[in-house]
Amino acid sequence: MLALLVCAVWLLAAASSHPLQRRLAPCPPFSNGTVNIAAYQLYPENVDFDEQSCLLCSRKSNIGSLYNASVVVYDPYKASVVSTIEFPNITRTPPFHIGGVAWDPYASKRAKNKSADEITILVDAAAAHETAGHDVSGDNYIIRWDAAAQKVLWSVNLTSVSRGRYGGPQDIEHDEQSNIFVLGTYPGTLMRVPRDGSRVDEWFVPAPRADFQPRRPRM
Ligand SMILES: *[C@@H]1O[C@H](CO)[C@@H](O)[C@H](O)[C@H]1NC(C)=O
Ligand SMILES: *[C@@H]1O[C@H](CO)[C@@H](O)[C@H](O)[C@H]1NC(C)=O
Ligand SMILES: *[C@@H]1O[C@H](CO)[C@@H](O)[C@H](O)[C@H]1NC(C)=O
Ligand SMILES: *[C@@H]1O[C@H](CO)[C@@H](O)[C@H](O)[C@H]1NC(C)=O
Ligand SMILES: *[C@@H]1O[C@H](CO)[C@@H](O)[C@H](O)[C@H]1NC(C)=O
């Protein structure tokens, strides 16, 4: 299965050889206060602005398209969808959602290569969210996307570490020490992944509580 994912990553890398055109410009403010985006099955729970892409050229923000399990790239200056990033065997493939999208603000600062422009994407299994944590089955992944080169840098399988004991990852954050944190919900957990994706650490996992009863989903 890991081979399949690696293969998917390789195919995607081979397929996307059309980096967006680049312009040198700092990100100017958006002129409008409200940004309305019309994109099928878009659920913009997670939106992030890619300040590096903007600095280098095209101005776009990345928006997780939750129900399609794809990432919508949107230009807030032109008010148009630039592209949709799709992942083989994840996009339009149950049980996957793309729940978290976060631009890494430290990637270009710490790298020798100042044009580094990296985005971390969370692929999560839907069941945990649909059942309020009763069913935490299905696999969850982190994908590291090179927004400049338009290719997957690496991916890791979070479930190979959580092994079905908890689930419902929802969000991502980066820190200055090159760590990627994944916030989980059922119950509250934090996983930590180094920026090269070489391992997954359980950074915070509460001790199992005998009296823990996940809430029933509201019908
Ligand atoms: C991810 O890890 C889980 C748990 O070890 C495993 O069942 C699943 O096959 C893995 N997925 C891939 C693509 O290797
Ligand atoms: C997607 O999954 C199918 C079925 O497991 C497999 O045959 C196919 O090679 C995979 N595609 C990619 C791009 O990994
Ligand atoms: C989501 O999937 C539907 C059905 O395949 C497709 O029509 C739509 O364009 C997709 N949306 C995005 C944002 O890719
Ligand atoms: C800004 O608002 C105006 C007036 O509502 C609208 O016509 C225009 O498309 C908006 N521009 C952007 C970039 O959203
Ligand atoms: C520098 O980073 C850019 C954007 O990620 C990439 O396209 C380019 O190949 C990198 N160059 C080197 C020498 O690593």
Image: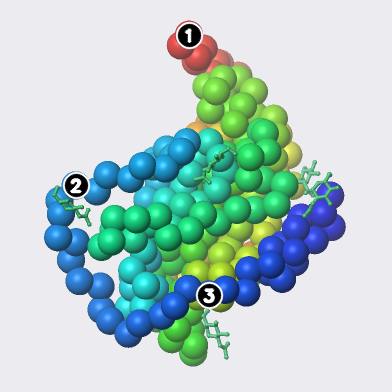
Where is residue 52? Give x, y as percent: 37, 74
Mark 1 — residue?
A: 219
Where is residue 205? Give x, y as percent: 57, 41
- Amino acid carrying label 1: it is Met
Front tag of 1 and 3? 3
For marks 3 and 2 on the same chain, the one whose residue lies earlier in the sequence = 3
Where is residue 3? Give x, y as percent: 84, 57
Q: For residue 152, what is the image quadrant?
A: bottom right
In the image, is the residue at mark 2 within 8 Å of ligand 4 by its beta carbon? yes
- Amino acid carrying label 3: it is Pro
Q: Residues within 10 Å of mark 1 (few under 14, many from 20)?
A: few
Q: CA distance from mark 1 to mark 2?
A: 32 Å
Q: Residue at x 49, y 89 (%)?
A: 112
Q: Establish if 57 lies above or below 207.
A: below
Q: Establish if 51 lies above or below 126.
A: below
Q: CA distance from mark 1 to mark 3?
A: 44 Å
Q: Residue at x 57, y 73 (%)?
A: 18
Kindly tell me whether residue 201 is visible in this rendering: no
Mark 2 — residue?
A: 34
What secondary structure is marked by label 3? Answer: loop
Q: Residue at x 42, y 60 (%)?
A: 82
In the image, is the residue at mark 3 within 8 Å of ligand 5 by its beta carbon? yes
